[in-house]
Amino acid sequence: DGVDFEVQTDHKPLKWLNKKAQGNDKCERWRLKFQQYRMTITRIIRHDNTMPDYLSRSPVDGPTDDLDDYVQRISR
């Protein structure tokens, strides 16, 4: 059993993670852990992968006040 999902990546070696045994112990543990899922890994070629570029250029708002800090100040 398991959950169907797709991983889209521009990291070419990751495509082989669920295809064959890994030489690296950590990667092999990941591969064995992921066997419980029905996972498909597809590679996105660099020029087709616009999301990282978008994320690096998107405006970021300044830090916001943490509501938990505000609650602690009032409750003292």
Image: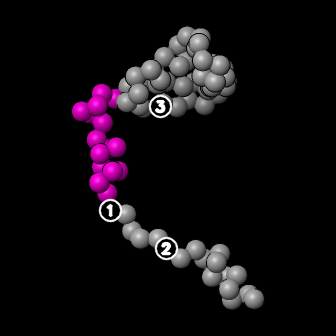
User: Which residue position is annotated with label 3?
Assistant: 7
Using the numbered discs, state the Cα–Cα distance from disc 2 to disc 1 in whole angstroms: 15 Å
Mark 2 falls on what kind of element? loop
Q: Tag 3 or tag 2, which sits nearer the N-term? A: 3
Q: Residue furthest top?
A: 20
Tell me the kind of residue under disc 1. Answer: Pro
User: Which residue position is annotated with label 1?
Assistant: 59
Q: Mark 1 packing: few (<14 Cα in 10 Å), some, or many (20+)?
A: few
Q: Tag 1 or tag 2, which sits nearer the N-term? A: 1
Residue 70 spot, x, y in % from top left = 63, 82
Q: Which residues are magenta?
A: 44-59
Tell me the kind of residue under disc 3. Answer: Val
Rendered position, 73 above or below 65: below
Mark 1 falls on what kind of element? loop
Residue 52 spot, x, y in % from top left = 34, 43
Q: Are marks 1 and 3 in contact (CB under 8 Å)?
A: no
Residue at position x 44%, y 20% from top?
13
Confirm whether residue 35 shows in the render.
no
User: Which residue position is annotated with label 2?
Assistant: 64
